[in-house]
Image (cartoon, helix red, strand yellow):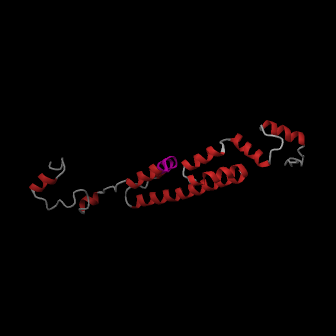
Amino acid sequence: MKLILTKKNNYMNDNDLKTILTALDLSSGASVNEILNRIEILKGEEPGATIENAIRLNYIQSYEKEGLLQMSKNNPGAFGKYINERKNQVIRERKAEFNKLIDNARNDGRLDHRPETRNLLEKVFELDYEGTKLFISSLNRRLRVMDYIDGTGMNAGRSGWTLNDYRKKSPAGTLN
């Protein structure tokens, strides 16, 4: 088996290959895929841990696990490429969803237009996707002074109340 090195077209001889196989703790008949798989393991996470992490982050679905484990053994390069593509796709989708949530919250008056607020929420969104999504969707619309003047604020509908209505229905603190 001869492998081409990229520097000055030097060729690797069989002794060099045996040294590499010994360092990787592989048999002398190891395939290229086995060598690449062992190198991937040494570079960082094992394929199983990578898959579990991707499932936890919702980059892939749990039903894909067995097929991806098989792919990691048979073709580590394609496995890594697939995981990265899925991760990038999910990040793009989440970023678009974040932008839509922020724009809707700003347009509804639930969130101010300061860039600092957006930057903070964007950082939190990267750390906790579901929690930030829930937080933004649960924000209440901010009341403005005009809401009180035109009767759409929190006291709307009380203009016709009598003293008895205030005694029965008014929340604490509004009788003063």
Q: Quadrant of residue 158?
A: bottom left
Name the one closer to the observer, 2 or 151.
Answer: 2
Q: Percent x, y for residue 110?
A: 37, 56
Q: Which of the 4 quarters of the picture holds residue 61?
A: bottom right
Q: Is residue 102 left or right of residue 154?
A: right
Apparent side of residue 94 relative to residue 25 in the rendered image (left or right): left
Residue at x 58% of width, y 46% of height: 53
Regarding residue 83, the answer to whether it shows in the image is: no
Query: x, y percentage for residue 69?
Result: 65, 49
Whole-percent x, y for residue 172 in the image: 18, 47
Identify the residue at image location x=45%, y=49%.
Answer: 131
Residue 28 drawn above or below residue 125:
above
Specify the segment rendered in magenta.
Answer: 120-129
State the residue at coordinates (63%, 45%). Answer: 48
Looking at the picture, how far across and down is residue 10, in whole percent? 90, 46
Query: Quick check: is 172 in the magenta stretch?
Result: no
Say if residue 93 shows up in the picture. yes
What main secondary structure does the magenta stretch of the protein show?
Answer: helix
